[in-house]
């Protein structure tokens, strides 16, 4: 007999679990307190699987049955995989791995099709790259709130920024910064996504030039780039982008001001000692050389002022980019510095834009900088001195509202809807919840282990949701089954809706080291389900070579063969392509499907080609048929009952061999143009 059982959860939440088969069924009596009031069959199941009531509650809070959808989506950095992970919350199920800096065969990204052009644009100084060190995803914003339209990510290792269109979850653009060698304070968007901010990490001569390390102080520099985002085109416009030269401190995390602090950007730094290593030559290693000063510098950048100076032409041009010189920035009030204690890390602007929270890798405090105080000092030109580059320094004690002891090694902070802050505590392996208003610790929960970033539902917006926080743990030691010496990272989902934080899910992440992620309400995302017929996703419109049903053909111009092909369940037209060794083959393939989730693939033996032909999509592929032989092509997606039959042949006859008879050609491509030959 089937009975619907209402289960009473710990916090007094009534949770209805589905239809449970129970042999002899007495409806459970509602119970108080910690007892879930589970039926006998559920209790047996709990016993059998050694589950506690807290486990069952967590399971009920995170389980999302098939057919029901998650409430939020996380866009997580895929770390060294160079990809982005889309993960549902609260189920923590992986929904998609988006190819960004790394070729992704299933999506046909980087395997002969149009996506190759995006990756080709991703070279740094002409060097082809097939990976990235992705750190910080940033969702596009309008008025400081996620709008669900675009996602940006950085590649720390090679100083690049990518644009992902959330209409189809496809990477549309990668820009390589021509000025710097590594970035880190990236990507962060201004409140209306006018700019995507990218800050350098390791100083080097601007323009990726050479200078001896002895000239570090004179020739090495940091930089913050403001990439102009063209919302209508959905692309960064390098010609409208510009940068500000920074001193050779190691700039680290960054965040854009909002509301009260709109127009400003904040960047922290370390190694203001400007240590350059040389440990083999008996000098202190960079690590200790960079940890001498008690204070490094928070950089306060008035980017709206910088934008005006750039418009007035106060820039120099390096490698085609407009750069506001350091001296101009220092003298005009574009940049000022404030002390930051003990190997600062993290730089998070509060939702109201009034304060900036900075952690410290060797500190036990979060420092709360107050923007009104900072602005007051800047406006009154009340400086506490200048650094070696002439940049005004504001007094630390006059710039902060206070400090709060949160644990050893606070890194990053996120926010909820009740004025609370959640700080990741690396050395303590914990999350500390504290009240921003009173600077009082409210709760602390251990995490497993060594948390780096932390993220919260809509956490970087002007109106965070609360509810969920995710600890992004670098280590997972005993949490999962062993998979060899390289352990998964661990995303731990915390329920933060009550006074006490509760750990409700451990999600192993077996791909790269995801540094940061953002979490958006699912109903803000409106991806398309199919492409309009003949769409080239990288053009954002119909491809000029799109093929309509009945217009399939093979055209030969000298030694160039253009094949206009369609794909629909379960055949390619044409399914025979005859060329001569040495010919250039251009395949133009349109999927004629318009039914949801009817994806075909396309591969041809030996050419390292694999396409994903989602409904309506058009792809162009070119290669030189430089080896004679018989090359089957086929659909790589199990699309239909006759998927295995969705195949064809490319016949490459040896150079100089006569073309097959007209009748053979006619059956290969029964179109007028093909028969002409
Ligand atoms: S960094 Cu990774 S833990 Cu690149 Cu944001 Cu702080
Ligand atoms: Cu189309 Cu398989």
Image (cartoon, rainbow, N blue to C red):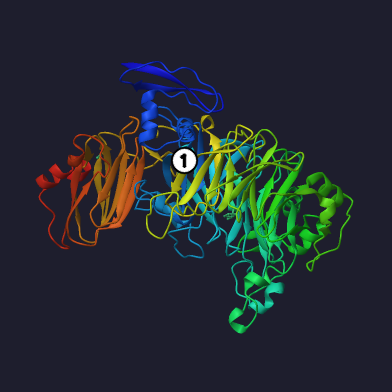
Residue 566 in the image: above or below residue 389:
above
Q: How many marks?
A: 1
Q: Residues within 10 Å of mark 1 (few under 14, many from 20)?
A: many
Specify whether 292 is left or right of 180: right
Location of the N terminus (image quadrant): top left
Q: Is residue 66 visible?
A: no
Whole-percent x, y for residue 418 in the image: 68, 33
Mark 1 residue's CB less than 8 Å from ligand 1: no
Q: Would you place residue 56 above or below residue 16 in this image?
A: below
Relative placement, left or right, of 533 versus 319 is left
Q: Nearer the viewer, residue 497 or 358?
A: 497
Q: Quadrant of ligand 2?
A: top left
In the image, 5: left or right of 571? right
Q: Is residue 273 visible?
A: yes
Of residue 268 and residue 415, the one placed in the foreground of this image is 415
Instruction: Please identify the residue farthest to the bottom as the structure is shown.
Output: 281
* Residue that label 1 marks: 87
**Residue 133 position in % (x across, y down):** 50, 57
Percent across and percent down for residue 90 are: 49, 35
Q: Quadrant of residue 502?
A: top right
Closer to us: 275 or 44? 44
SS category of the residue bearing label 1: strand
At 57% from the left edge and 62% from the top edge, which residue is drawn? 182
Q: Check the image and report above or below for 671 versus 361.
A: above
**Residue 515, percent across and down?**
54, 52
432 on left or right of 480: right
């Amino acid at each position: 007999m089937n009975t619907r059982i209402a289960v009473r959860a710990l916090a007094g939440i009534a949770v209805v679990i589905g239809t449970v088969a129970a042999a002899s069924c007495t409806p459970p009596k509602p119970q108080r307190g910690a007892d879930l009031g589970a039926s006998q069959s559920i209790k047996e199941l709990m016993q059998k699987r050694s589950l506690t009531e807290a486990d069952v509650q967590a399971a009920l809070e995170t389980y999302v049955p098939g057919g029901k959808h998650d409430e939020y989506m996380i866009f997580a950095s895929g770390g060294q995989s160079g990809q982005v992970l889309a993960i549902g919350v609260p189920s923590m199920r992986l929904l998609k791995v988006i190819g960004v800096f790394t070729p992704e065969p299933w999506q046909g990204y980087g395997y002969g099709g149009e996506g190759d052009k995006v990756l080709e644009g991703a070279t740094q100084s002409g060097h082809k790259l097939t990976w990235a060190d992705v750190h910080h995803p940033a969702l596009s914003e309008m008025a400081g709130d996620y709008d669900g339209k675009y996602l940006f990510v950085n590649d720390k290792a090679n100083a690049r920024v990518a644009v992902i269109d959330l209409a189809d979850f496809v990477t549309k653009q990668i820009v390589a910064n021509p000025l710097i060698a590594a970035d880190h304070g990236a990507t962060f968007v201004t409140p209306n996504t006018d700019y995507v901010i990218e800050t350098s990490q390791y100083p080097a001569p601007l323009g990726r030039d050479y200078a001896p390390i002895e000239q570090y102080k004179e020739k090495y520099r940091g930089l913050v780039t403001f990439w102009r985002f063209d919302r209508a085109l959905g692309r960064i416009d390098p010609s409208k982008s510009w940068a500000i030269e920074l001193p050779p401190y190691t700039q680290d995390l960054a965040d854009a001001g909002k509301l009260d602090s709109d127009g400003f950007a904040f960047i922290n730094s370390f190694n203001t000692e400007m240590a350059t290593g040389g440990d083999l030559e008996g000098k202190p290693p960079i690590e200790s050389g960079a940890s001498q000063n008690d204070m490094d510098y928070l950089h306060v950048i008035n980017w709206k002022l910088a934008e005006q100076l750039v418009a007035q032409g106060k820039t120099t041009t390096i490698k085609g980019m407009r750069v506001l010189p350091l001296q101009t920035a220092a003298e005009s009030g574009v940049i000022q510095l404030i002390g930051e204690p003990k190997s600062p890390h993290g730089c998070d602007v509060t939702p109201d834009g009034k304060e900036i929270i900075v952690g410290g890798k060797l500190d036990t405090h979060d420092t709360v900088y107050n923007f009104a105080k900072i602005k007051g000092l800047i406006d009154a030109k009340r400086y506490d001195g200048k650094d070696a580059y002439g940049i005004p320094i504001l007094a630390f004690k006059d710039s902060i509202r206070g400090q709060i002891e949160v644990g050893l090694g606070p890194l990053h902070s996120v926010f909820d809807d009740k004025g609370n802050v959640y700080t990741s505590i690396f050395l303590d392996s914990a999350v500390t919840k504290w009240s921003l208003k009173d600077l009082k610790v409210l709760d602390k929960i251990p995490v497993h282990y060594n948390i780096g970033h932390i993220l919260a539902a809509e956490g970087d917006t002007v109106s965070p949701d609360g509810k969920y926080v995710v600890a992004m743990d670098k280590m997972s030691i005993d949490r999962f089954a062993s998979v060899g010496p390289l352990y998964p990272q661990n995303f731990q989902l915390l329920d933060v809706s009550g006074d006490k934080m509760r750990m409700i899910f451990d999600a192993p992440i077996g791909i790269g080291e995801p540094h940061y992620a953002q979490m958006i309400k699912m109903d803000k995302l409106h991806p398309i389900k199919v492409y309009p017929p003949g769409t080239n996703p990288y053009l954002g419109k119909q491809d000029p070579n799109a093929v309509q049903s009945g217009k399939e053909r093979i055209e030969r111009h000298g030694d160039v063969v253009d094949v206009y092909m369609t794909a629909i369940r379960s055949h390619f037209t044409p399914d025979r392509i005859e060329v001569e060794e040495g010919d250039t083959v251009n395949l133009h393939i349109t999927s004629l499907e318009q039914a949801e989730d009817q994806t075909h693939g396309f591969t041809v033996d030996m050419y390292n080609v694999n396409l994903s032909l989602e409904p309506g999509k058009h792809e162009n592929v070119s290669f030189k048929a430089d080896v004679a032989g018989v090359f089957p092509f086929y659909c790589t997606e199990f699309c239909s009952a006759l998927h295995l039959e969705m195949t064809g042949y490319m016949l490459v006859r040896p150079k100089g061999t006569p073309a097959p008879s007209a009748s053979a050609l006619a059956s290969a491509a029964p179109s007028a143009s093909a028969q002409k030959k």
